[in-house]
Image (tube, rainbow, N blue to C red):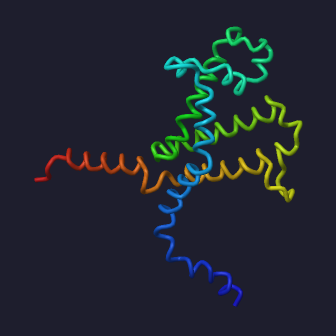
């Protein structure tokens, strides 16, 4: 009796198995677009410097946002930073702009989602330790505390879970990944020698 009762939901929803993966992968990318795309694009665009050269020369705000402690140590004089700090800020700015776009269009989805998990982790650590968020417990939040609005442990846990789903499942049927696979498969078939 108990076994029948416990297996009832599985039997009732077994018909969804065939299409749940494609639907859920596309839905995960859609949710990412609706919740996080504009957030990251706006943040990344603010980090770009002036004009076309801003693509390779981030703004002072980018340095202050990404490297708060090193910037404070040099009196907010970017020219005093070591070369690797410039590389960190440049790569961080590009990642903040490119990774979300790749996820939304579904191009290199698994790699982009994995990169985004790394970005969210670094972002969270910078918020907590670089910008002093650890001093404010509401910024950190806590699990199992009946307060689901903590920025780092609560909200970003959901972000990472959604990104992990894309790492394991890919971009789905409505993605640039799927289109590229179809094109390359068709090309390979066309290039095969005729069997005689």
Q: In this view, does 43 lie to the left or right of 147?
A: left
Q: Which residue is drawn at 53% across and 22% down?
A: 55
Farthest residue in the bottom direction?
Answer: 1
Please tell me how many numbered marks the rendered image carries: 0
Q: Residue at x 85, y 59 (%)?
A: 146
The answer to whether residue 136 is above or below residue 186 is above
Image coordinates for residue 99, horizontal then vertical, percent: 54, 38
The answer to whether residue 169 is above or below residue 110 is below
Farthest residue in the front direction?
Answer: 51
Image coordinates for residue 190, horizontal then vertical, percent: 20, 47
The answer to whether residue 63 is above or below residue 115 is above
The answer to whether residue 37 is above or below residue 95 is below
* Residue 96 lies in quadrant: top right
Farthest residue in the left direction?
Answer: 196
Q: In this view, does 62 lie to the left or right of 190?
A: right
Between 103 and 183, the residue placed more toward the observer is 103
User: Could you tell me which quadrant the N terminus lies in?
Assistant: bottom right
Image coordinates for residue 17, horizontal then vertical, percent: 50, 71
Image coordinates for residue 134, horizontal then vertical, percent: 85, 37
* Residue 47 lies in quadrant: top right
Q: Which residue is drawn at 79% across and 17% down?
A: 72
Q: Which residue is drawn at 47% across and 42% down?
A: 108
């Amino acid at each position: 009796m108990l076994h029948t009762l416990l297996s009832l939901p599985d039997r009732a929803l077994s018909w969804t198995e065939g299409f749940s993966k494609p639907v859920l992968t596309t839905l995960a990318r859609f949710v990412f677009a609706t919740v996080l795309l504009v957030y990251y694009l706006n943040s990344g665009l603010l980090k770009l410097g002036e004009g076309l050269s801003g693509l390779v020369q981030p703004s002072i705000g980018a340095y202050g946002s990404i490297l708060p402690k090193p910037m404070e140590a040099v009196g907010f004089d970017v020219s005093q930073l070591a070369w690797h700090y410039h590389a960190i800020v440049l790569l961080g700015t590009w990642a903040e702009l490119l990774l979300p776009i790749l996820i939304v269009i579904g191009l290199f989805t698994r790699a982009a989602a994995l990169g985004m998990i790394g970005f969210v982790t670094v972002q969270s650590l910078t918020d907590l330790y670089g910008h002093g968020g650890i001093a404010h417990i509401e910024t950190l939040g806590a699990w199992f505390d009946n307060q689901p609005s903590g920025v780092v442990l609560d909200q970003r846990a959901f972000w990472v879970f959604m990104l992990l789903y894309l790492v394991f499942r890919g971009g789905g049927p409505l993605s640039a990944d799927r289109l590229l696979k179809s094109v390359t498969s068709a090309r390979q078939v066309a290039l095969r020698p005729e069997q005689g």
